[in-house]
Amino acid sequence: MKKILVNVVFACSFMFLFSSMFLFYYDDFVSAVTSVQFDENKAFPIKECQEWTEDVRDFNVTKGNEAKEITVLMYHRVLDDQDVDVVHLDDKGDLYKTIVLKSEFEKQMKYLKEMGFVTITLEEFTLFMKGDINLPQKSILLTFDDGFKDNYEEVYPVLKAHDFTAINFIVTGLVTEKNQRYQAEKLQYFSVSDIQQSCEVFEFQSHTYNFHKRKGPRKSYLVIKPEGEIKTDLQTSLVNLNGSNKAFAYPYGDYNDTSVKVVDDLGFELAFTVESENAEPWMDMLKIPRKAVRPNNTMEDFKKLLYKPIETAP
């Protein structure tokens, strides 16, 4: 009888301990199970909901009010202020330069709206760069790199509320098959569901399939890898993107003659760098500059990005 009682107590204790551990690690378990990467041989089911990206609006620009150049802004991550953790800070205790607080992002978008700025599509931008259409002076192209999940959680609602659109250059090999519970402290990327639900605001374009990497501190894959490997990677990203090769963003802004040739061979119309200048018609379409928005930018800094070129390297 005593032996039976001991076994029962042991079994109950084990079940209690197991249940406690399961509940404690439940979120991590679910995340691990549901974070399977999207099939590299399949296309994201967004072809129909991206048809708006081919539309070209008539802005009725009057003579003398045409844009001479366009500011292209570059963002990466946007975090809710209360989600900032030690993992988001550098050795000096400052936010990493690729993170912008949501409170600041909201101020920036509110300013653009109040000042009458209009966000343009890649198609409209392309035609402007070719000298085929006129755009209003206060035209702007918003871009986001990498496809972080916070772009869906934090950025998408703000852009939608202001009736703005933006380009999202995604690393398609990081897109997950199923949705995950958003955890700001972890590096998480779009799920297919996130892409589907935000595709009326974001234009999705390539930031490679799996070549957003470096070997060593400064050697980007798009600079050191053989031409054939670069082409294969970008072709895979295009499979995921339903063949949409309107634009490409060089990871880290790194490129050389080989990577530019691959981008050209694959039929990309535009490719974006991180050189901090305004985009002007007839410049090299595969080396379009962008101005990075940083966490330490004040509103005055932000206004300078909009109205005149800056010399500070990103």
Image: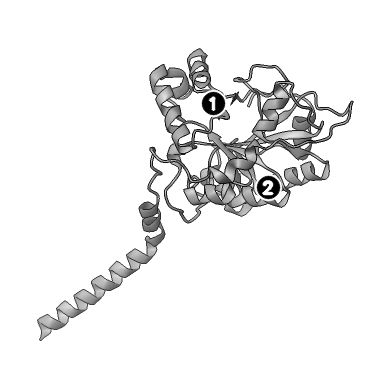
* Residue drawn at 42 percent across, 48 percent down: 177
Nearer-the-camera pick, 189 or 58: 58
Residue 10 in the image: state x and y as whole percent: 20, 75
Q: Residues within 10 Å of mark 2 (few under 14, many from 20)?
A: some
Locate the C terminus by quadrant: top right
Q: Where is 45 relative to 61, above or below?
A: below
Locate the N terminus by quadrant: bottom left
Residue 30 in the image: state x and y as whole percent: 38, 58
* Residue drawn at 21 percent across, 78 percent down: 9
Q: Secondary structure at mark 2?
A: helix
Nearer-the-camera pick, 126 or 109: 126
Q: Amino acid at mark 2?
A: Leu
User: Where is residue 231, by image quadrant?
Assistant: top left
Q: Where is 85 relative to 216, above or below?
A: below
| Res 279 visible | no
Q: Residues within 10 Å of mark 1 (few under 14, many from 20)?
A: many
| Res 105 visible | yes
Gap in Å between the C-alphas at discs 1 and 2? 24 Å
Residue 242 in the image: state x and y as whole percent: 49, 37
Q: Amino acid at mark 1?
A: Tyr
User: Where is residue 284, by image quadrant?
Assistant: top right
Question: Which residue lies under the disc numbered 1?
Answer: 250
Whichever of callouts 1 and 2 sits on the residue coming sooner in the sequence is: 2
* Residue drawn at 79 percent across, 39 percent down: 117
Question: Which residue lies under the disc numbered 2?
Answer: 159
